[in-house]
């Protein structure tokens, strides 16, 4: 479904991604792993079109998307849930959800129905649908940004570091929410530094270090590898 081949991405003179390649098949959940600064967000932004690639190619559903603008990539079904869980603080949960569908064609026809569907997946949001988003807890807010991403009817949902800054108990709730999405058949690319949680969810993973892919394998193999156990799991 998504194929990233040998992309190079720089911020000004500083090259951040070097010949990075990975793929995501339809219905898969693939983890992009790496510590802070490894280049995960940069890779997702290159896919969304928020950053230009210097060279290399990105194709989605067998078409090259290198030349597409960010809005066109959204309409093609590539949706990025940005890190940090930012919401429109003074809008209600429901209004935030409706904003998630605003880029789609004929959004007004489908958005109330879609909002119903995603709040059924995340009952906490249903209970709080009339609360202002600023009043949500960190975990609820992260759930809202996930749900808002779903409102755009993603073919591929890219989730950037959903665990960031959340307490352990809430982390589990977020990963359970992601698990529900998987069961619903949503294809997911998950950028995460919490290797343990990410690999419990994902089918496969790629490890980014200093802007390069240094390992790729099934989640099970990665969890058993010496390098992962030493460098990321503290074992
Ligand atoms: N806007 C930017 N300008 C310059 N350098 C940046 C910018 N954003 C990120 N970087 C650098 O690019 C590298 C990769 O960052 P990032 O993709 O955010 O990593 P990750 O998401 O894995 O933590 C880091 O060294 C970071 O300092
Ligand atoms: Mg990041």
Image (cartoon, rainbow, N blue to C red):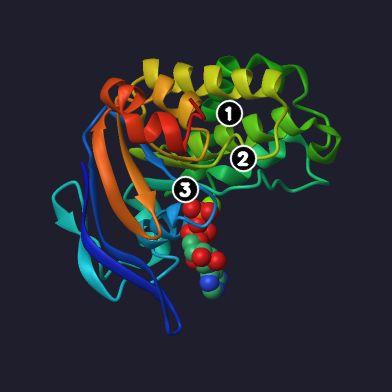
Q: With 166 as the anchor, is 235 left or right in this view?
A: left
Question: N-terminal of the two: label 3 or label 1?
Answer: 3
Label 2 crowd (10 A; few <14 / some 14-19 / many >=20):
many
The residue identified by callout 3 is: 80
Q: Nearer the viewer, residue 49 or 121?
A: 49
Q: Nearer the viewer, residue 188 or 111?
A: 188
Q: Quadrant for the N terminus, please.
A: top left
Residue 198 horizontal/vertical position (percent): 45, 29
Image point (69%, 18%), residue name: 169
Quadrant for residue 119, please give it: top right
- Label 3, label 1: how far apart the Cα atoms are: 18 Å
- Label 3, label 2: how far apart the Cα atoms are: 16 Å
Image point (54%, 22%), residue name: 175
Residue 188 seen in render: no
Q: With 146 as the anchor, is 141 left or right in this view?
A: right
Residue 111 horizontal/vertical position (percent): 54, 35
The residue identified by callout 2 is: 98
Question: N-terminal of the two: label 2 or label 1?
Answer: 2
Label 1 crowd (10 A; few <14 / some 14-19 / many >=20):
many
The answer to whether the residue labelled 2 contacts the one labelled 1, judged by CB atoms less than 8 Å apart, is yes
The residue identified by callout 1 is: 115
Q: With 221 as the anchor, is 80 left or right in this view?
A: right
User: Which element is circle 1 on?
Assistant: helix
User: Which element is circle 2 on?
Assistant: helix
Image point (42%, 37%), residue name: 153
Question: N-terminal of the two: label 3 or label 2?
Answer: 3
User: Which element is circle 3 on?
Assistant: strand
Residue 5 horizontal/vertical position (percent): 19, 58
């Amino acid at each position: 479904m998504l194929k990233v081949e040998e992309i190079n991405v720089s911020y000004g003179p500083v090259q951040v991604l070097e010949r990075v390649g990975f793929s995501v098949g339809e219905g898969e959940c693939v983890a992009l792993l790496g510590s802070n600064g490894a280049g995960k967000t940069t890779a997702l932004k290159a896919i969304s079109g928020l950053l230009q690639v210097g060279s290399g190619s990105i194709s989605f559903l067998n078409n090259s998307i290198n030349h597409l603008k960010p809005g066109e990539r959204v309409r093609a079904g590539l949706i990025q849930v940005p890190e940090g869980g930012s919401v429109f603080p003074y809008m209600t949960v429901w209004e935030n959800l409706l904003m998630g569908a605003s880029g789609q064609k004929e959004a007004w026809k489908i958005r109330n129905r879609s909002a119903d569907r995603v709040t059924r997946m995340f009952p906490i949001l249903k209970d709080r649908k009339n609360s202002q988003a600023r009043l949500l807890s960190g975990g609820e807010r992260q759930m809202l940004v996930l749900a808002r991403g779903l409102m755009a009817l993603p073919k591929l949902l890219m989730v950037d570091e959903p665990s960031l800054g959340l307490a352990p108990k809430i982390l589990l709730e977020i990963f359970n929410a992601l698990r529900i999405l998987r069961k619903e058949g949503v294809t997911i690319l998950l950028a995460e530094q919490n290797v343990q949680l990410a690999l419990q969810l994902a089918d496969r993973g790629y490890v980014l270090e200093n802007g390069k892919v240094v390992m790729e394998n099934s989640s099970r193999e990665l969890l058993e590898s010496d390098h992962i156990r030493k460098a990321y799991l503290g074992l």
